[in-house]
Image (cartoon, grey):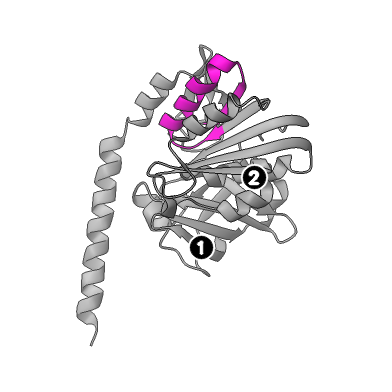
Amino acid sequence: MFEILHTRRLTPVTTLFEVDAPLVAKAAQPGQFVILRVHGRGERIPVTITDSDPAAGTVTVVIQEVGATSKMANELKDGEHFHDLAGPLGEAAPLREMGHVVCVGGGFGAAAILSILKGLKPKATRTSAIVGARTAELVILEDRLREAADDVHICTDDGSAGYKGFVTDKLEELITSGEPVDEIVAIGPMVMMRAVAATTAPHGISTLVSLDPIMIDGTGMCGACRVTVEGETKFACIDGPLFDATKIDFDELVRRNKTYRAEEEAALHRYEEAHCHAEAAAAAARP
């Protein structure tokens, strides 16, 4: 059992958790992830490590509600527990010693790029963060990102905060401004990462993306997280999660991620229905 020391609601559907996990915190490197379960018979879900503090023995993760398990996780409070938290898993992000690195975070990806930006901070590397969300209230961790990066560019679809437009629009503007860009790291929804890859390819800039395909054990044994990279089968859990964006078969990856869409929607419906019944019963029992 892993105690939740502190929670912070970042948006209506996104929650930050600071968890007591000394061994994970001691070994965690930027770009790695954990797999957690809410309860003993629950689904295992991969979550990128947002931050870690070896001295305090804590690991910070951010969970966005997309299905039954993530919704269940975001209902946990301070003092409660995750049943499992296994990690750190995956390969650490390669950190450039110099040059200009631009980290692009779409939605929940803003939390995932934080550990990479913090890892780059002690190095002779200039860092920029481009963070996107549909609207201002969905922008997360801007305060922490500004502490870690030299420059932060906020993008919103509706223009309610920062730049009005997509992260790819801002990225193209930054690349063509004349300022050298040596590497790009993009983390977020699949469609966003594919769009970033298409934006950077004509400029020949090294671009890494963090993949989150269907995953079960996180150790390379189940094969569920297989992806095709430069024509070869790789496993996101042990060969990644970061890969060269120009070498990924995104079409295949998008198709595979939709494999259990019907089952996921059914599970969410059952959970929400049971939750509503439980709330109604509790309300009826009140004096």
Which quadrant holds the N terminus?
bottom right
Q: Give the camera-side residue of 84 and 241.
A: 241
**Which callout, 2 or 1, points at the residue further toward the start of the chain?**
1
Q: Residue at x 27, y 62 (%)?
A: 275
In the image, taking residue 77 as reference, residue 49 lies left or right, namely right
Q: Which residue corresponds to mark 2?
A: 115
In the image, taking residue 206 as reference, residue 46 lies left or right, namely left
Which quadrant holds the C terminus?
bottom left
Q: Which region shows up in magenta? A: 186-210
Residue 31 appears in view: no
The secondary element bearing badge 2 is classed as helix
Decide whether residue 190 is among the magenta residues.
yes
The percent coordinates of residue 277 (x first, y second) are 21, 65
The secondary element bearing badge 1 is classed as strand
Amino acid type at mark 2: Ser
Q: Residue at x 22, y 81 (%)?
A: 285
Decide whether residue 57 is among the magenta residues.
no
Q: Which residue corresponds to mark 1?
A: 8
Within 10 Å of disc 1 (Cα), the crowding (few <14, some 14-19, many 20+) is some
Q: Give the camera-side residue of 217 and 249.
A: 249
